[in-house]
Amino acid sequence: MGRLRIILTLALLAATPSRAPAQTAATPDYNKPAAWLCLPGRTDPCSTPLPTVALNPNGYGSVGRSTVALNPPVDCFYVYPTVSNDRGMNSDLIPDEAERTTVQMQFARFAGVCRTFAPLYRQLTVSSVTASAFGANILPSSKIAYGDVASAWRTYLARYNKGRPFVLIGHSQGSAMLIELIKREIDGKPIQRQLLRAYLPGFNVLVPVGRRVGGDFRSVPLCAASASRGCVMSWVSYRERNIPPVGALFGYAARPGLTVGCTNPARPGATGWERLDSYFDTRASYPVAGGPIRWSSQGSPPVRFVRTEGLVSARCVNDGRLGYLSVRTNADPKDARTDRIGGEVGALGFFLPGWGMHLADVAIAQGDMIRQVEELSR
């Protein structure tokens, strides 16, 4: 398993465009607006309207646009996933298309329900995955990345928060950074009272088997109900009937007595199948089993993004050390919608084992996340 993962990861990285090697960028100053991808009250990736078309069982519906709320009562602090193709272990602080597009896809729509804060940070690059696979010590580089996120967080609290409730949102490496942030800066401290909710998909949040708290966090629990506050929503997605293998990167707890926490993003606390409210980027470049998706029998969508309510369902599975979100498409050959969605990480015709539908973690439930933030902030 380990050798196959390395081979496939290297194949994936070999196809990735690279830049000339660069020195680690200087420590960012988060008092300066240039150190942020998104800040309230300015034109940036989070304030740009995203045209989106409804994809209904009978075909395409109306086209709408994301909005920016005038005076939302809550703040959202977002840390983006691994997207940097910069050479070296840490990215620079020059936002390119990958950072901007990812922030738009995963976070911009939250501007309709909260003030949006998204710091640039010297994240671990895609290249660092290769180094780690070969046993390189990436701890110093990880500390650089986390140090930036922690510095941005402290600046946010000092300059912008002013006692407001906040929501934390991440994915993959971004979720990993926020897990560490909660451990060090929030868990058991007075600021925990302002935590409305944390959304940490795409990375393992560990809890003792059969419990909602413990493991990674001392006092911040997994969410148990739709109205739960001060809690964590976490899931790692796998296609139905695809069970995480022993030792999987996502969905398997290496330590005995622990499991990977799972909260159903449609309805926390639910144990059965729940229909999700999804937003998909129809121009996403990741591979899909069966070839490119035909989103509707009516043809190509009129805009880049589609919203599908109920096309995808999911349920949480916990079995000993295994914990994951099982995902299925509600295929109906009689309706106009696609019967397939993507999400797996692939290379050379193979999907990386132990990664599941990692690339779709946020997309499949983004509408549910936005709705919950709006409901909790009332």
Image: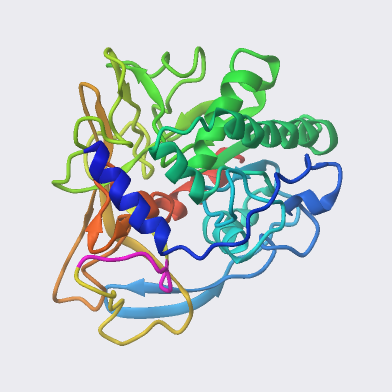
Looking at the image, which is closer to me, 3 or 191?
A: 3
Pinpoint residue 175: horizontal percent, then vertical percent: 51, 37
Q: Is residue 375 left or right of residue 267?
A: right
Q: Is residue 28 above or below residue 349?
A: above
Pinpoint residue 271: horizontal percent, then vertical percent: 24, 34
Q: Residue at x 76, y 30 (%)?
A: 154
On the image, which quarter does residue 349 sit in? bottom left
Can residue 41 be seen from the camera position used here?
A: yes
Q: Residue furthest bottom?
A: 299
Whether residue 285 appears in magenta in the rendering, the answer is yes
Can residue 355 be seen from the camera position used here?
A: no
Looking at the image, which is closer to me, 130 or 84?
A: 130
The main secondary structure of the magenta stretch is loop
Q: Tell me which segment is drawn in magenta.
A: 281-289
On the image, which quarter does residue 187 sit in? top right
Q: Residue at x 72, y 52 (%)?
A: 93
Q: Is residue 169 above or below residue 42?
A: above
